[in-house]
Amino acid sequence: MKVVGFAGFSGSGKTTLVEQVIPELRLRGLRVSVVKHAHHSFDIDHVGKDTYRHREAGAFEVVAASDRRLALIREFEQPAQLSVHQLLAELYQGVDWVLVEGFKESDLPKIEVWRAPEPGQVARPVRYPHDDFIVAVATDAPQQLPVPTQRPVLDLNAPAQVVDWLLQHADRFDYQWDLHGDLLPCAPQ
């Protein structure tokens, strides 16, 4: 599997870019998964549903499956901070690409998403000068980047271009499995 992160401040366009990259990869016959970092409490279950009732009764895990979809809900007994690598290990191994949104501190190769400030706003800082895992910058205003860079600069509004670049450099996004079946992270390049 190939893994690439998308990092940037809230409102920079990460979700929109990931949402646009998915169908571009699918059009090229590739299977795509997404790992998303959630900062807040979230729930995919609803009061009154069987899975909710099972979870409320004390089940550690509830799997709901149909002929079209599978959902696993795991209830942690204590707050847990899972690493991106632990989450990647939960995914189906037959996926071609995993797009990781968030986890900006991770040791995954990442595309930094940076949007120019609106008039009257202050530009958000960039990560690429001090983060060796930033392999490219996707922006809507390359001429306004606050720090010059030698990294590739991609058009935030051209997801096909982003996918072309990812596929041209696909080898650098390989995520390896070790002899024990555990995932090994990509190395920065």
Image: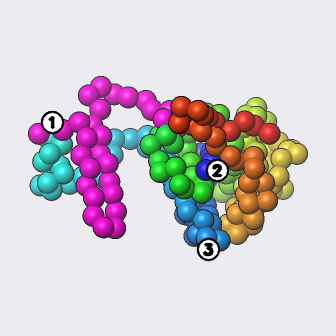
Res. 132 in view? yes
Residue at the (27%, 37%) spot, across then down: 75
Q: Name the residue type under label 3.
A: Leu
Q: Residue furthest front?
A: 179
Q: Residue furthest bottom?
A: 27
* Residue 58 tag number: 1
Q: What is the spatial separation of the Cα atoms under label 1 and label 2, in whole angstroms?
A: 36 Å
Image-quadrant location for residue 167: bottom right
**Residue hosting label 3:** 27
Lower position in the chain sequence, tag 1 or tag 2: 2
Image-quadrant location for residue 140: bottom right
Is 63 colored magenta in this rendering?
yes
Percent of width and height locating residue 7? 62, 45
Q: Nearer the viewer, residue 21 or 187?
A: 187
Q: Name the residue type under label 1.
A: Gly
Residue at the (44%, 43%) spot, across then down: 90
Q: Name the residue type under label 2.
A: Lys
Residue at the (47%, 51%) spot, across then down: 92
What secondary structure is found at the residue carrying circle 2?
strand
* Residue 2 tag number: 2
Is 72 colored magenta in this rendering?
yes
Q: Nearer the observer, disc 1 or disc 2?
A: 2
Q: Which residues are magenta?
A: 57-86
Instruction: State if disc 2 and disc 1 touch (CB < 8 Å).
Output: no
10 Å crowding of disc 1: few (<14), some (14-19), many (20+): few
What secondary structure is found at the residue carrying circle 1?
loop
10 Å crowding of disc 2: few (<14), some (14-19), many (20+): some
Lower position in the chain sequence, tag 3 or tag 1: 3
* Vertical comparison of 157 with 170: above or below: below
In the picture, measured across the screen, residue 73 lies left or right of residue 103, that is left
Q: Residue furthest top?
A: 78
